[in-house]
Image (cartoon, rainbow, N blue to C red):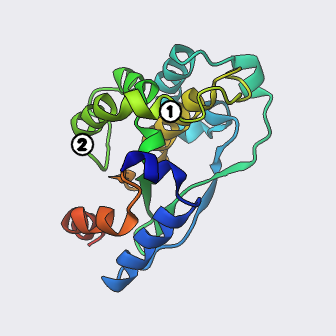
Amino acid sequence: MSRYALSMPVGDCENAFMEAARREGVELVRYKKPWINQRGHFGLPDRAFGVTGPLNSIFLSLGGNSTEQAAKRTTALPGDFMHPPTGTIIEVDELQHFTSFRLQSFEYYPTGSRLGFEPDEYQELCRKFAPEADKYRQSKTAVAFGPGGRQRQRAYYDALRDLAVPAMGLPPVIRIPAADGNGRTAFERNRERILHALS
């Protein structure tokens, strides 16, 4: 099933999730925040100073090159969804997000971090799916992470959202696991949690 998920057309999972939410009366929009940009923690405003230390630790632990990262443009990174009435960001995570590198990133989350998901559950999902997820685009290069660095970059940018969004005064990021690539069932499995968070 997971191999099928990786072969699905880009965007199918997110589109199915958004449609399932709409049927429940939850209107979601695609979003970009100027302070979630390609520079990562180097591009955060002073308001988010409290999380730059942990994010730098995550960045370095994943083999990031600070000089290259800080030299990137401040182009905003596209995210999945935002719920406009509450400003809540929702990320739908397919198989490629559950790597050993993502698991590693949680070691540096500060105690008491405001998260819109259960980190223990996510770490368990990473342990379960990493053997396959680690193979996804295994050789793809990413600036500041070098050859084979795309997976490490993705783990870093996921952590960036988790820690920076509440530091900027928004509700914690809601993460929805969809390792099977099925956005509709991902919404249905998490329906109560989503509706409660947005109420």
- In the rendered structure, find residue 133 and report the number of the disc placed on it: none
Observer-nearest of 52 and 18? 18
Is 112 located above or below residue 62 in the figure? below
Q: Residue 136: where, in percent of width, then height? A: 54, 35
Horizontally, residue 163 falls left or right of residue 29, namely left
Q: Residue 20: where, in percent of width, then height? A: 36, 76
Distance Cα–Cα, label 1 vs label 2: 17 Å
Observer-nearest of 181 and 26? 181
Placement of the C terminus among the 4 image quadrants: bottom left
Mark 2 lies on residue: 118
The residue positioned 56% from the left and 55% from the top of the image is 79
Observer-nearest of 101 and 136? 136
- Under circle 2, the secondary element is loop
Q: Residue 28: where, in percent of width, then height? A: 46, 74
Q: Nearer the viewer, mark 1 or mark 2?
A: 1
Horizontally, residue 53 falls left or right of residue 33, namely left
Q: Earlier in the sequence, mark 1 or mark 2?
A: 2
What residue type is disc 2 on?
Glu
User: How many dots with numbers?
Assistant: 2
What residue type is disc 1 on?
Ala
Mark 2 burial class by Cα count in 10 Å: few <14, some 14-19, many 20+: few
Q: Residue 140: where, in percent of width, then height? A: 68, 30
Mark 1 lies on residue: 155
The residue positioned 64% from the left and 23% from the top of the image is 148
Mark 1 burial class by Cα count in 10 Å: few <14, some 14-19, many 20+: many
The answer to whether mark 1 and mark 2 are in CB contact below 8 A is no
Is 132 located above or below residue 23 in the figure? above
Q: Is residue 193 visible?
A: yes
- Under circle 1, the secondary element is helix
Q: Is residue 170 visible?
A: no
Is 91 located above or below residue 100 in the figure? below
